[in-house]
Amino acid sequence: MERRPNPTRYPQNNAFPSYPFSDDAYNPSYSPKPRGRGRGGYSTASSVARGRGRCSSRQQHHPSSNSNNRFPIHISQDFNHLDLNAEDDTAAGAGAGGINFDAYESVPVEVSGDEVPPPVESFAETDFPPALKTNIERCKYVKPTPIQRHAIPIASAGRDLMACAQTGSGKTAAFCFPIISGILKNRRPGFSSVVLDRGGGTVSYPTALILSPTRELSCQIHDEAKKFAHQTGVKAVVAYGGAPIFHQLRNLEKGVDILVATPGRLVDIIERGKVSLTRIEILALDEADRMLDMGFEQQIRKIVEHMNMPPPGVRQTMLFSATFPDDIQKLASDFLSNYIFLSVGRVGSSTELIVQKVEYVEDTEKINHLMDLLHSQNARGANKKPALTLVFVETKRGADNLEHTLTRNGFPAIAIHGDKVQMERERALRSFKKGVTPIMVATDVASRGLDIPHVAHVINYDLPRNIDDYVHRIGRTGRAGKSGFATAFFSYKNNHLAKPLVDLLQEAKQEIPSWLSQYTDEAPRYDGNGGSHRSQRYGSGKYGGRDFRNVTDPEVENYDNHSNGYADSSSYEMANSAPAAASCHDTYANAELYGGSKVEDGPGGYASIVPTGWD
Ligand SMILES: Nc1ncnc2c1ncn2[C@@H]1O[C@H](COP(=O)(O)OP(=O)(O)OP(=O)(O)O)[C@@H](O)[C@H]1O
């Protein structure tokens, strides 16, 4: 039976439809119906109390199963308290550009390595060429974020860098600005990035290479790099799988300084002899821990160590992420030379800007809970745009099913996952960004890096298998100093996450439900399935946050005090090797010739560990 909202359940000013159905393409003919038994009604508490299904025994341990304070009510109230109606640039504490710098001022900064260049306080202080400074102003970046303050001088000095900072804190510019500046300063007159080969074809020689794990993220970085390099003469080109290669090759032939790419497509282009890495001076890996994670390290090694790229020490290498497990740090150090480790905030911590809620929800009740939650939230966001909601699920099939169920029940939803062809993926993202479908159901293809304005709420319908993925997922909201809201549906299946989740909530000064704390006592030690290397992160309450090279505690300082003795302590949507690459905004007349990623669900049907766009 269809689940329709019951308008009497909520105050009139919150009555359905709460989403601004701004697009004619979605205009459900809503007719309130009384709910039937079972799926119908706001039965979340009672149905759990019924203890049906395989969860019934667990229910007896679950302290909240008989309580009345379950959502949707209190969730919706919390959600509606968020300042969703604030205009971008006038949000409390926000400077120009809409970023609330105050939110970052108390974040601890850790830096270690030899002869660390001191941070800058402003973009004016940097030695960036005037053309770049003009573009920074044009982008309304009035002052640098903490990661930018610290990373820019390090990167500008040509130093290798492993940098970790919270989601949405401006890492992209932290590596893009020094790259563009370096190219502008070092450009030799008459230097050409494209040369003819013996057969009359062309080979492109980029100066900088930026690798990222997903197609969408590569496109986003490329768009940013183009904005920052506007009218400087620095050329950025993107190459990613799932789109026709000819267009991307044509762009490369016109000259390239910065190549932004996903690994699979890059290997394809190199093997076709269209790109040479022999002149790479700067290599940047965004989402570096993902890029070096289990199974994918080999492909990165192939690119970095076996495709004629200059070695560490000759090239400059920068690794960025919001999470950096110790063993990945160790592995990454192979690619670096005398590097500086920088972390702004504890490694893997989430920002306090995101209000996090964890709710106990049985699998059988998830759909009801989700719909209750969606009904109840007040959906007008910043600039009167819809408050976008991102719902993460575990499998690609699960994403399609949920999209179908939501749509059938009158919710404007669209799914994005790795079994969709690239054109569909981009269409889904566009439709979500514009608010045409303000609910996007996603696998982990959308969990990292994507900077979508006005995402107000991230719902972990299925929790991920490791806490780092959780950090990245919720990081799609609460970006650039703005507030956000994240809700997780937790069930007994997730008990291995209880401890890291409690640690994370504690770290981010969030409310910890008492029932969740109880799970930490009975949870098995995190087995790391999907993250075994991370076990050290959960050993104690004080996880992460440090340079693995430091045997003793590194200096951790309050950001405000950085001038005092600034611490100078001496992957997975797997290789779809579709012939490959075009600008993200190209039309894909031939897309069907190449197909999108067609990766089966991983072991146990976990699409989430197969990051889309590894091509
Ligand atoms: N100095 C600045 N002033 C104003 N806005 C900024 C500044 N730096 C970055 N931003 C904005 O902040 C937002 C988040 O930046 P970015 O996407 O680089 O975050 P991130 O740290 O890479 O996040 P993630 O870990 O999720 O990849 C972007 O919209 C960006 O334009």
Image (cartoon, rainbow, N blue to C red):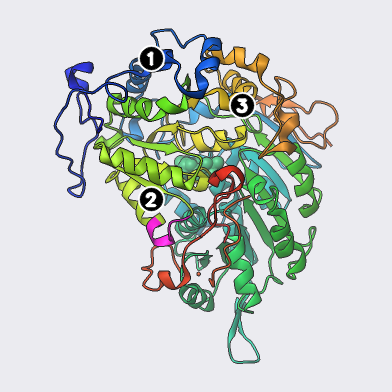
Residue 344 at x, y percent in the picture: 63, 33
Residue 420 in magenta? yes
The kind of residue on which mark 2 rests is Leu
Mark 1 highlights which residue? 45
- Disc assigned to residue 429: 2
- Say which of marks 3 and 1 sits in front: 1
- Mark nearest the camera among 1 and 2 is 1
Q: Secondary structure at mark 1?
A: helix
What are the residue bounds of the magenta stretch? 419-424
Mark 3 C-beta to ligand 1 under 8 Å: no
Label 3 sits on residue: 497
| Residue shown at the point (42%, 44%) measured from the top left | 399
**Sequence-first tag of 3 and 1:** 1
Classed neighbour count for the residue bearing mark 3: other residues with Cα under 10 Å, few (<14), some (14–19), many (≥20): many
The residue at the point 81 percent across, 42 percent down is 114
Check whether the beta carbons of the residues at disc 3 and disc 1 lie within 8 A of each other: no
| Up-down relation of residue 615 to residue 498 (above or below) | below
